[in-house]
Amino acid sequence: MEIRTKLSGTKLIVYPLGKLNTSTAPLLNDELTKQIQRGVSCIEIDMENLFYISSAGIRVLLSAHKALNGNLMISHANEVITDVFENTGLTDMLYIV
């Protein structure tokens, strides 16, 4: 998985590419943690080029959501990923556009 980022003030847009699973989730977790420690207070995860998410990926998102006091937004999730969010009840917790 490749991760691209774009910083705009204190908002970070993260573009994960590929699969977010057990082997790649630590990469995203490390990037999000690093950015939060640098003072980023709002993160958008643009999932346009992400085609799979596992429970390990969900854990990373929930951890970031907690660290940011809810200032985590998910955008451009495909139907498969949106179904995962709906089936796990995350649509009630995360801000998904």
Image (spheres, grey):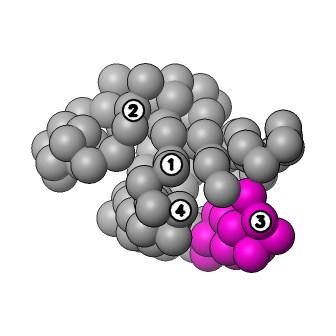
Quarter that holds the C terminus: top left
Q: In this figure, which residue is indicated by the disc labeled 2?
A: 96
In this figure, which residue is indicated by the disc labeled 4? Answer: 68
Q: Is residue 34 magenta?
A: yes
Kindly report the distance in space between the C-alpha atoms of the residues bearing marks 2 and 3.
23 Å
Badge 1 local density, few (<14 within 10 Å), some, or many (20+)? many
Which label lies toward us, 2 or 3?
3
**Is residue 31 in sight in this rendering?**
no
Write the start and end of the magenta stretch as one range: 26-40
> Could you say whether the residue bearing mark 1 is in a helix, strand or loop?
strand
> Which residue lies at the image location 51% right of the left edge and 70% below the top edge?
67
State left or right for residue 69 relative to residue 39: left
| Three-letter code, disc 1 | Leu
In the rendered image, the quadrant that contains the N terminus is: bottom right
The three-letter amino acid code for the residue at tag 3 is: Gly
Proximity of marks 3 and 1: CB atoms separated by less than 8 Å: no
Q: Which badge, 4 or 3, comes first in the chain's sequence?
A: 3
Q: Which residue is mark 1?
A: 72
Near-viewer residue (20 or 93): 93
| 22 sits left or right of 35 in the view | left
At 53% from the left and 62% from the top, the residue drawn is 68
Is the residue under label 2 in contact with that under label 1 (CB below 8 Å)?
no
In the image, is 68 to the left or to the right of 12?
Answer: left
